[in-house]
Amino acid sequence: MSALYEAAFRRILFPAYETGLRRRRTLAYLDAYRRDQWLAPEQLAALQWARLQRLLEHCYRDVPYYRKQWRELGITPNDIRNLDDYARLPLLTKTDIREHADELKADSWRDRLLYKATGGSTGEPMRFGFTRESNDRRTAVMWRGYEWAGSRMGRRTLFLWGGPVGDPTRAHQLKDRLYNTVFARRVLNSFKMTEANMAEYADAIDRYRPDIIVAYVGPLVQLAEWLNACGRTIWRPQAIIGGAEAMHGFQREAIEQAFMAPAFNTYGCREFMLIAAECEQRHGLHVNSDHLVVELCGSHGTANDGDGHTGDVVITDLFNYGMPFVRYANGDMATASAERCSCGRGLPLLARIEGRILDAIRTPGGHVLPGEFFPHMLKDVPGLQRFQLVQRRLDRLDLSIVRGAGFDDASLEYIHHEVDKVLGDSVQLHCHFVDEIPLTRSGKMRVTVSELAP
């Protein structure tokens, strides 16, 4: 029955919803990206370069921030003749985006943009704009990457993911349930997972019997370790897709031992959605180079993508013409690979993702809260410019807040309310207003820090 529904969803229901009702071009883009992935590396490089040239010309013509910056540097799009020239353009940082958000909007798009906020995994929530086309393309690229792990539209999928924050209305909850039912999805809130209720999560998986599990890596590893420790056998999915942080080798082993299924690593961020993902060979993560330009840069922003090189991730979305991010440093680190994957895809590889591992928070009652909870919850708090959560004792959390003009008593009350909902009164949250939050020695911002012994 599930195979019949999957086929009906993929061929009839989803096209009717996505193309007919929502008038999106996701499926057309997905077909094109599916074809592109099999191009030879030199063909993909040529395709990427042609798309990058068009974007740079648009930025110079239509985006005040780049036009002013490049003119001051004496640069025009005609001066950028190859990727080496392109790599000499200045980096774009989160600070640049906050300080010049209006100038980064294309003149021809500024009244038609859609908006999202980042989860603030570097401790600095950020709002950014994007076009409908770029969003449809990002969704298509996400589906393509998940397909490499065996995930398909309409396939029975369980998400061990962050739940909603705030107090969603009954109508909103009903809408979510209906949406998930139609899409053959079940969502388990990973933020409510504790040592005491692991069996409830395992029972829910057994009842739902998913073909695919998509999960935050942290909670997934905790559940896997519990299953392995107690020797419980659980429903065996076809594949497991990890997200939100890097999946290390020892974690993959624990997951695959517990679920008896292959685990796939992915890499993405809210600004661009899926950046890279493992295919069925699992010998590195394929970069979506037909959709993005991804560089690994040294300390001065210069690209160095040689085999085995580790550098800061710098990204350009080739299709967000509304608020283009050109050479955006997202705060992550990765290691390059020059290997050609035996799957036959021409998309380049990253050997591994090094950055963005958020510390988990623990309580006296055995609750293990993934670090993703705090950027997820705090991203929409008005006036919150920067934050860092530190745990030095089991019964205490210290939240440092750099506040702006919009932060008020209601903002503070909301933070306490949301933390109390998840952790109860076993842990006291202490909020401190500060002028600055220091970076680590590597120049990064750790948003959640646990100083407890393992």
Image (cartoon, helix red, strand yellow):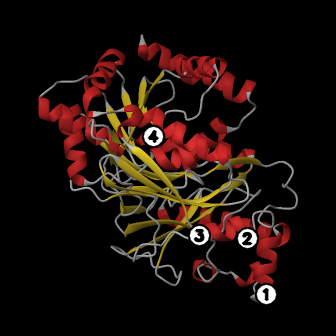
Identify the mark at residue 146; answer none if there is no mark: 4
Of discs 1 and 2, which sits in the foreground? 1
Give the vertical position of 327 relative to 248 (above or below): below
The first of marks 1 and 4 along the sequence is 1
Q: Quadrant of residue 48?
A: bottom right
Please tell me how crowded label 1 is: few (under 14), some (14-19), or many (20+) other residues with Cα within 10 Å.
few
Mark pair 1, 3: CA separation: 32 Å
| Secondary structure of the residue carrying numbered label 4 | helix
Quick check: 154 above or below 360? above
* Residue type, numbered disc 4: Tyr
- Give how far apart the Cα atoms at labels 2 and 4 are: 30 Å
Estimate the spatial distance between the alpha carbons at disc 3 and disc 4, rounded to whole Å. 42 Å
Foreground of the two, 138 or 190 = 190
Q: Is residue 250 visible?
A: yes
Disc 2 to disc 3, how far (Cα)?
37 Å
Mark seen at residue 356: none
Question: Nearer the N terminus, badge 3 or badge 4?
Answer: 4
Q: Secondary structure at mark 2?
A: helix
Label 1 vs 3, first from the N-terminus? 1
Residue position for label 2: 56
Q: What amino acid is at disc 3?
A: Asp
**Can you tell which of label 2 and label 3 is closer to the viewer?**
3
User: Residue 228: horizontal and vertical position, in percent?
Assistant: 15, 34
Q: Residues within 10 Å of mark 4 (few under 14, many from 20)?
A: many
Residue bearing mark 3: 435
